[in-house]
Amino acid sequence: MLSMTDSIQEIIAKIRAFRDEREWMQFHDPKSMAASVVIEAGELLEHFQWKNKEEAKEYVKSHKNEIAEEMADVAAYLFEMSDNLGIDLLDAIHKKIEKNAAKYPVEKAKGVHTKYDQL
Amino acid sequence: MLSMTDSIQEIIAKIRAFRDEREWMQFHDPKSMAASVVIEAGELLEHFQWKNKEEAKEYVKSHKNEIAEEMADVAAYLFEMSDNLGIDLLDAIHKKIEKNAAKYPVEKAKGVHTKYDQL
Amino acid sequence: MLSMTDSIQEIIAKIRAFRDEREWMQFHDPKSMAASVVIEAGELLEHFQWKNKEEAKEYVKSHKNEIAEEMADVAAYLFEMSDNLGIDLLDAIHKKIEKNAAKYPVEKAKGVHTKYDQL
Amino acid sequence: MLSMTDSIQEIIAKIRAFRDEREWMQFHDPKSMAASVVIEAGELLEHFQWKNKEEAKEYVKSHKNEIAEEMADVAAYLFEMSDNLGIDLLDAIHKKIEKNAAKYPVEKAKGVHTKYDQL
């Protein structure tokens, strides 16, 4: 059983093996992979489609496995795509946080959800 | 500098700190987080909107940083959402691969992109 | 100036003319068109990303033009796609409403947002 | 049977009646409506997820009804949302085409899918 303390690389190796056993790399061009990420993200959002905040809060407690599965679908395509493109996803997040820290200085952004160009 | 060999937990801790410094947790209910994942996934897809396979292949070489940034946005929301919901994302992927292995047996799925219910 | 009482066919003719003057039909295969619909839909959703119900209600009053523009983008791709595929979109909606009326009988569906397979 | 020559207003009246009989307006805030548009758009894109251009071309011939149904779902939410917000969708498309004509002058945009800020 893998856990969050395991490396993301191990799971990418599993995804790669799953795909290559089925000879699916031929279908996994970047456009189709990006489309797959958005399709699965839509399925994740569908769980919350008509729910208000209170309903959503209750729902995530009683449907954790179903939500985890949709999130896994998004993540698996995203991880594979990063692997296909030679992108270090964790490093990219690290850099994006630094960039966002400049765009959203704490003193201006605290407690508001205003977009950076309106701050 | 983080790399793919670092734990996903380290990056989640960074995301959490970034959010909490800005007191943004109040906006990060599950529906808004899922909406954010799909919004960013749409921006990732936009890079490939009108491109054919050959153009996409060239584009990913010359625009690696831009694509990495969009993927980082999707991943950051997904990672934070998993953290908020107490979902072990890597474990969820691990389980989903096992489930998909049953739905897509190698001998039937090899070399075709048919959906499991049509295999 | 067109208004809602004009036929959808007139606007499709305009969209078609705009596209053909620019020789863009070569890029408008069904996959790219469907991708474009979802990309623009994501931009529409972005307007509401972090807003609660009250904020969204105020926002739609003060940002009607911006929202109308995003909705126009989704609709224009959808209309053109229906034209390209020889699909009568209004007839398709008419049929879908009949289908949904059977899936969501008034006596069961009234006042609840339960999905039909859970009703 | 409605056809493309009917007014979009007739179909919006039907959508409104369907919704109100079920007392669903309470769930149809703008954020949930925009989420619904993107969710259904994702389902439309799913039909083309792994297909290349030739496969997509064949598929639209043999699965016209299925695709029409997904497009109807996107359109129905979009039409209802425009009605809820008092937005004249056809007029909005008309204005957007004029705006795009300025952003994509024929002599520059002809035969290329370059984004306007790169033209």
Image: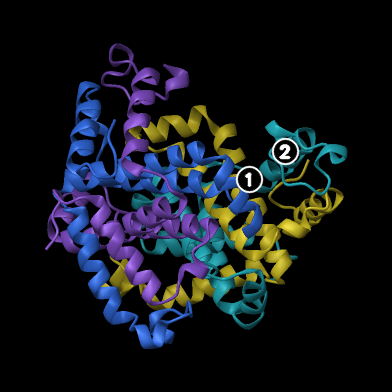
Chain colours: A yellow, B cyan, C purple, D blue
Mark 2 to mark 1 CA distance (whole Å): 9 Å
The residue under the point 37% across, 46% down is D37
Q: Are marks 2 and 1 in contact (CB under 8 Å)?
A: yes
Q: Quadrant of residue A114?
A: bottom left
Q: Residue furthest top?
A: C107
**Tag shown at residue B95:** 2
Q: Position of residue A15 (x, y in %)?
A: 77, 52
Quadrant where the image shows the C terminus of chain C: top left
Q: Residues within 10 Å of mark 2 (few under 14, many from 20)?
A: some
Q: How many marks?
A: 2
Side (left or right) of C102 relative to B59: left
Give the residue at x 39% y 49%: B32
Please say whether residue A119 is visible from this viewpoint.
no
User: What chain does mark 2 sit on?
Assistant: B
Q: Residue at x 67, y 62 (%)?
A: A81
Note whether C9 is above or below B67 in the view shown.
above
Amino acid on which the number 1 mark rests in the picture: Ala
**Which corner quadrant holds the N terminus of chain C?**
bottom left
Query: In front here: B36 or A35?
Result: A35
Kindly identify which chain the residue marked by label 1 belongs to. Answer: A
Give the residue type at disc 2: Lys
User: Element at badge 1?
Assistant: helix
Q: Nearer the viewer, residue D65 or C50?
A: D65
Closest to the observer, C75 or A32: C75
Q: Nearer the viewer, residue D72 or B72?
A: D72
Q: Position of residue B92 (x, y in %)?
A: 67, 41
Give residue C57's position: percent from left, percent from top.
17, 48
Q: Regarding mark 2 in the picture, which secondary structure is present there? A: helix
| Residue B14 higher or lower than B114, as above or below | below
**Residue C98, image x, y percentages:** 34, 24
Q: Which mark is residue A72?
A: 1
Say which quarter of the image contains residue D53: bottom right
